Image (tube, rainbow, N blue to C red):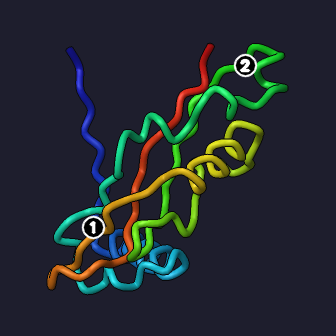
Amino acid sequence: VSSAVVDLGPMEMPIQALQGCVTELMHEWGLDNWAKGPPRRLAMPIGNPGKWMDPSDYPRDMLAKRRQGIVGFRLVVNERGLVDKCFVDVDKQGPFEEAVCQAITKRAHFEPALDADGKPMRSLYSNSVRFQF
C-alpha cells in the first residue's frame, strides 16, 4: 500500500474566496436569510417525493431512443412551502432536465424551513430523479 501527501499550503484565502462565492450564489437564489444562520428546520417534503414524477413525464424522444439518466436538482422553497426556482446539476439542459423542473415545480409541496425564531423562511432542497425503463 502506498500513499502520497500533498502540501496544499495555507488554505485561508481559498476558503474565504469560496465562502464569497457561496454568499453570492445564496443572494442570487434569494436566500440572503441564511446569512443569519442555518434554518432550525429544513424544508420537508409533504408526501412522497417519489410521486412528484410519473411515467407520463418521461420525455417521449428519450423513451423512443431507450435513453436513461439521472438528474440531480436543487429547489428554492419559499416561506409558503412552494417551489420558487428549480436548478439542475448540469450546464446545458436537455429533455430529462426540462421534464424534472417542469413536473417538480408543479407537484412538489413542502413544510417550509423554519428560522431560529421558528418563522417560515426560504430554503434549499436537493434530490435526484432516475429515468429508467
Residue, disc 2: 67
Q: Residues within 10 Å of mark 1 (few under 14, many from 20)?
A: few
Determine whether the residue tagged by mark 1 lies in a helix, strand or loop: loop
Q: Earlier in the sequence, mark 1 or mark 2?
A: 1
In the image, residue 30 above or below residue 131: below
Q: Amino acid at mark 2?
A: Arg
Q: Nearer the viewer, residue 92 or 68?
A: 68
Q: Nearer the viewer, residue 24 or 16?
A: 24
Q: Is residue 84 left or right of residue 79?
A: right
Residue, disc 1: 10
Q: Residues within 10 Å of mark 2 (few under 14, many from 20)?
A: few
Rounded to the nearest angstrom, the CA distance separating label 1 from label 2 is 46 Å
Residue 124 location (% of width, % of height): 40, 63
In the image, residue 21 above or below residue 50: below
Q: Is residue 34 left or right of residue 98?
A: left
Determine whether the residue tagged by mark 2 lies in a helix, strand or loop: loop
Which quarter of the rendering shows the C terminus? top right
Q: Amino acid at mark 1?
A: Pro
In the image, residue 44 above or below residue 3: below
The residue depicted at 35 percent of the width and 52 percent of the height is: 45
The residue depicted at 33 percent of the width and 70 percent of the height is: 15
Is residue 78 visible in this depiction of the protein? yes
Which quarter of the rendering shows the N terminus? top left
Residue 12 location (% of width, % of height): 28, 73
Kindly report which numbered mark, 1 or 2, lies closer to the viewer in this rendering.
2
Q: Residue 70 shows which numbered tag?
A: none
In the image, residue 31 above or below residue 77: below
